[in-house]
Amino acid sequence: MREIRLEGLRLNPEAFGSTYESEQSAPLEKYAGWLANSQIFGAFDGPHIVGIAAFGQFTGAKDSHKGWLRAMYVRPSHRRTGASRLLVQAVIDAARTRVEQLQLSVVSTNTPAIRLYQSFGFTQYGLESRSLKQNNQYSDEILMSLRL
C-alpha cells in the first residue's frame, strides 16, 4: 500500500492533501495507524496492485452517521479500465452498512474523477477555494456527498 500511495503523491501531487516528501520519510507506523482507522480497498491486475481507495467513518457523537472516501488513486496504466469504478463501488458498499452519508473532496480540475463520482450519484454541496497549496499554486476542492 505504501508504494502505490507514494506513487500517487509523486505523479499526481495536486490531488492529495499530503505530499510525497512528507510521506516518503514517514515511519511505517504512520501507515499502520492509517490502516487501523480506515478500511482500505485495492484493485489488482493479477498479483499487482493498480489502485487504492479508503473508507472511514467520522467518530463524533453528532457526525458518526457520515463517512468519507479518500486516498483514491489508480495507476495511469489502469485508468479507464474499470478499476476506479470497482474501488468506488467497494467503498460505497462498505459505507452503506455503517453510515447514512458518504463524503469526498476532489480537486476542481480533475474532471474525470468528478464525472466518475457523479455517475454514482455524488452531488456537489460546496467548494473550498484555495484548499490546497503547493509550490505557490492553489487548487480548489469540490466537496461532494452521496446519501445512502
Image: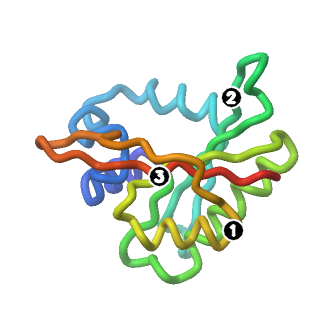
Residue at 70% in and 47% down: 102
Q: Residue furthest bottom?
A: 81
Q: In x, y percent, where is residue 18?
A: 34, 38
Of the numbered discs 2 and 1, the one sitting upstream in the chain is: 2
Mark 2 highlights which residue?
Answer: 58
* 2 and 1 marks in contact (CB < 8 Å): no
In the picture, the disc for residue 142 is 3
10 Å neighbourhood of mark 3: few (<14), some, or many (≥20)? many
In the picture, the disc for residue 81 is none
Q: Residue furthest left?
A: 136
Q: In x, y percent, where is residue 24?
A: 27, 37
Q: Amino acid at mark 3?
A: Ile
Quadrant of the image occupied by residue 130: top left
Local SS, label 2: loop
Looking at the rendered image, the disc whose residue lies closer to the viewer, 2 or 3, is 3
Mark 1 highlights which residue?
Answer: 120
Q: Amino acid at mark 2?
A: Phe
Of the numbered discs 3 and 1, the one sitting upstream in the chain is: 1
Q: CA distance from mark 2 to mark 1?
A: 21 Å
**Image: 70 above or below 23:** below
